[in-house]
Amino acid sequence: MLTPIKVFDFRQEPAYVSNDFSSSRASEASYYGSDGYLHFTEPGQEGLAINEDLDSIAWIKVGITTSTSENVSAIDRPGNAMKLIETEGSGEHRLSLNATVVQGEIVTLSVFLKAGTASRVQFSFASSASYTGGNPSVKFDLAAGSVISTSSNLVDFKASYQENGWWKLSITGMPDLDTNSGLHVYLLSDGDSINYEGREDKFLYISGSLLEQGGNSTGHPLRYTYNTAENRPYLEGVLIEPAAINLVPYSQTLINSNWRKQYATVEESGRKSPDGENPAYRIQENNSFTAHYIVPSPIIATEIGRTYTMSAYLKAGERKWAYFNVNGLTVHFDIAEGIVGNKSSIFSSVLVQKVNNGWFRCVATFITYLPYTFTVIGLEEQNGRQFYKGDGSSGIYAWGVQVEKGLTATSYIRTNERPAKRAADVVTLIKPENSGLHDVFIQRMDGGKWTSKIDGNYEIPTSASVTQVINFYDSDESIISKEETAQNLFPQEYAEVGESGTLITFFERMYNAQHANKKWSLLKAINKSSPIYRFEVKSGDVWYGDINNQNRERSEFYMKNSDLPFDQDIWLSFSMRIAEGDALNLAPTEFCYIGQFHASPDENDVNSPPILALRMDGLDTVNVFTCSTMDNPHRQSPKSILRGSSQFTRGVWHKIVMRTRFSTTRGQLQWWKNGEELINLSGIEIGYPDKIGPYWKFGIYRSPMPQTLTIEYANMEISYDNSLRSRIEGPLLIV
């Protein structure tokens, strides 16, 4: 695995401002916080929200303990505030945090504090050796709202009253001597000393702090976002998103008259929305026999032929099924279990994201063929049954509706009387010191990417997916080294593709899944940019299409509507890894295909072997067979001819390139494995005299056997319009 020369791991929220990157955004934007709720940042140059987990080892506690208040709400987020409690004993009573700043550039610290049984505090920078004159500081009385004293080297100080006794204190200083810094929050004695005899009944409240390189306290952190689906939210990374527009007015105010209510009413529910502050809305059916739904007004203007994504936060009430209706076509959601129900084929992608407190964000992507899009959110009696007699009292909860241009849902954008735009995030990484050209690896939640020969600082490309890690490496590293690095840092995480019959498109080719509908049958790597699929067949895994022919086991894709041409170069390029396992040791009548060009037989033809196939045998042998006949129709199955073999070490990725021409008289075949040519034949017979050309299938198709076989395929490309010869020496990276 390669050793990086600079690492940015955004899965760990730092407790200091770094001078290794800069970021800005010209609008507010949302993210999920560590408290499990949706938050909004305002526009501006980014500062850094300091980790509020006071149990973190980053926080230094001297003469104090911390605990969560039982009844005092935090001011900057949902949930309760933290308490700083004195311990008995003589000395200092403070909370501290170390940080690194830019020497010679002013720094602003902010903190929210509230008086408890103690009210007098000193708020200061840490590391006195970095500041001429010592730590810039202020002493403040939170109960009286008055300044006790300030140090002479403060560049600026602001105290702003918030509400319910909360004060925001902001101090600005100049670290002119060094880069070490941080903050101290001291509890003071009645005589305003930092050294005194503590008492366990003395405490005050704290609710969030911020350290920013610059002269103004803005409170706009880089958007570290958390996965809130689990009981304890965990940090996923940062959002560095492109610009987007939410086209739905009053998207979180569903009670507004711009939302037309059809055989339903909308009211404030008294329950919290996903942001933990504003009320959610309850959509309640009336007692009519009809559909019950709400519609945004005016109708949303869209561009013909463009892809849009609709999303909404939904929560089950007395009804657990809800639906979107887009221009008359529907998709249905179980918002109690978080699963997709029936859906129209207009929706190219549909998913349900678990958020918090029973909320789900339901998402559906579609192409619009009209200059407008009519959108509906409704509740229903059961999956797909939106027309029913309501009971006049049942309902669901809804909030935060969004329709945006693009292939996926981005972070929620709140709106009022008109559509609202979220500006793009601009994040630039400072290049490593003393380096020339370098390569950059980015890993996001949905996959990785290598960028080569970067000279200078690097502006991170925007993406709807969360950015986790960005590493700098020396330039001109090998493809194998890059793949191994990406694999070791982020092994594949797999999820089920779907039931047999699911259609999947990659590299502009559509494939149909055929498998036994087992949870292991066909999986997709969800954290990889490369299309990587994992096929597994165990004894007895019979596809329903083979139900009358039980001597078949399979899990494979076949390429729909391909009809590949005769007498023309057809290129195939992919990577394959066979998992460790038992040898097959097949009998002469047994077979195990792991890739095949299947004929499209004419009406009177008998079933025959594939015209070109990869067959596995033994522990790691892969054989290439061809088959052909001139008979038309052919009433007898021709024999397959072995054209070449190679050993495929298990547990290792192998790069495959093939070029073939299907012809009963002038066929051609070339086969490369890991850059080495293994077969080069011309003037051979490949194929049958069919009216329609063959189609490609890959995965596992075999006769019954006891062994479990697992194979991964990556970057499956097939082309007859353009050569893939470049893939021999330059295969696509698996990332």
Image (tube, rainbow, N blue to C red):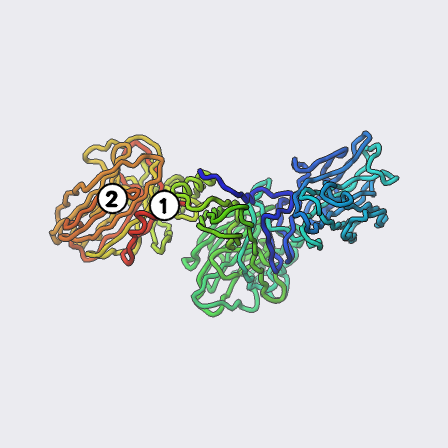
Residue at horizontal 75 percent and vertical 45 percent from the top: 132
Furthest residue toward right: 191
Question: Residue 284 lies in what quarter of the image?
Answer: bottom right
Question: Residue 116 lies in what quarter of the image?
Answer: top right
Work out whether residue 496 can be spotted: no
Tell me the kind of residue under disc 2: Glu
Kindly identify which numbered label has been placed on residue 677.
2
In the rendered image, residue 213, in percent from the top left (x then y), is placed at 67, 51
Give above or below for 715 relative to 389: above
Which residue, given by chain and number where applicable, does mark 1 sit on? Answer: 714
The C terminus sits in image quarter: top left
Tell me the kind of residue under disc 1: Ala
In the rendered image, residue 512, in percent from the top left (x then y), is placed at 33, 50
Furthest residue toward left: 631
- Residue 332 as seen in the image, left or right of residue 534: right
In the rendered image, residue 608, in percent from the top left (x then y), is placed at 18, 46
Q: Nearer the viewer, residue 703 or 40?
A: 40
CA separation in Å, label 1 and label 2: 20 Å
Q: Which of the marked residues, 1 or 2, is nearer the chain's N terminus? A: 2
Total numbered labels: 2
In the rendered image, residue 214, in percent from the top left (x then y), is placed at 68, 53
The reply to whether discs 1 and 2 touch (Cβ–Cβ < 8 Å) is no
Q: Nearer the viewer, residue 523 or 92?
A: 92
Query: Helix or strand or loop: what does disc 2 sit on?
Result: strand
Q: Nearer the viewer, residue 339 or 134?
A: 134
- Label 1 Cα neighbours within 10 Å, binned few <14 / some 14-19 / many ≥20: many
Kindly identify which numbered label has been placed on residue 596.
none
Q: Nearer the viewer, residue 608 or 196?
A: 196
